[in-house]
Amino acid sequence: MAATALRVALDQGTGPSGDTDAAIARLADRARAAAAAGAHLLLTPEMSMTGYALGAAGTARRAEPADGPLRRAVSEIAARTGVAIVYGFPERDGEHVYNTVQLVDDRGTALAAYRKTHLFGDLDRSAFTPGDRLVVQADLHGHRIGLLVCYDVEFPEAVRAHALAGSDLVAVPTALMAPNTAVATLLAPARALENQLHLAYVNRCDTEGELDYVGLSTLVAPDGTELLRAGAGEALLVADLDPRAADATQDHLSYLGDRRPNLYGPLTR
C-alpha cells in the first residue's frame, strides 16, 4: 500500500480533432494548471493527442511509434511542469495500429504503454488491432497505476485483473458518447467498489462528426464514493487519493478475499 497521498488531475477536454499541434499546446496549458493545483498526475481522455473518430485512413496517417514525436513532446511538457501525464494516441508498430495510452513520469520518462484490448464496434475495429496484454502497470510516487481504455472498463474481468495484480488506481481514458451515460454514472463507481481500488474515468466532452461525447468524468474511491464528478463541459478537476482508503474499505467489505475462483472456470470457456 502506498504511503503518501497522490494528487490527481482529470482533464475533461481535448483539442480540435486531427490537430496534434493544438493538442500539444492545450496539454501544456492543462499541465501548467495541474501543476499550479499541486497535482502529481494528469489524466487525459482517449486518443487525446489526435482525436478519436478519424476513420481508419485518418487514424493510420497520424499513427506513430510509442517513442515518436508525440511522446517526446509530452515528455518535455511533463519534465517542464513536474507533472506525470497519461495521454492517448494511435500507436504504429509495424503494420499494426493500436489505440494506446501511455504514462510518462514527472521527469518525462515513459513508464508504461497500454493497447486497448476490447475494441468497440466498427469504429475501433476498422482502425485498430486489439492489444493482447490486459494488465499494464507502473509505479508512481509509491502508487501502482494501472491503465485501461474506455470500453475495457465495461468488462468486469479487466478491472478485477488489475485489483488482483495490486493496482491502487486504474486510469481509464475514455471517449464515451451519448446516450451511454450509465457507463460513467453507474458502472465506473461500481467497478471501483467491487474491486476496492481507485478508478479514474476521464471522458471527452466535445463532438466529432455525429458523435456527441457526454463528459461526466469521475474519480471514484474504493468504497464507491465519487471524489470528483464533472458535468457536460470542459473542466480540470483535482483531488487527492488517500492511500489508506482501500484498507479501510476492506475492513467491512471483503469481495476480493471472499472470492471462490475454483467455481469460476466456466466463465473463461
Image (cartoon, rainbow, N blue to C red):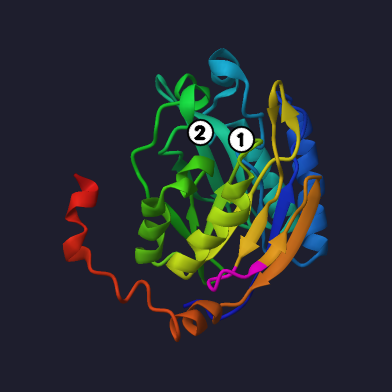
Q: Tag 1: residue type?
A: Met
- Look at the image and tell me in which quarter the C terminus lies: top left
> Could you say which is closer to the camera, residue 72 or residue 169?
169
Residue 30 disc label:
none
> Could you say which is closer to the camera, residue 223 or residue 85?
223
Q: Is residue 263 left or right of residue 168?
A: left
Q: Tag 2: residue type?
A: Asn
The residue identified by callout 2 is 99
Q: Mark 1 or mark 2, which is nearer the start of the sequence?
A: 1
> Could you say which is closer to the camera, residue 46 or residue 82?
46
Image x and y of residue 127, in percent: 49, 21
Magenta segment, which residues? Answer: 221-226
2 and 1 marks in contact (CB < 8 Å): yes
Magenta run includes residue 210: no
Magenta run includes residue 222: yes
SS at mark 1 in the image: loop
The residue identified by callout 1 is 47
Residue extending farthest to the top is 57
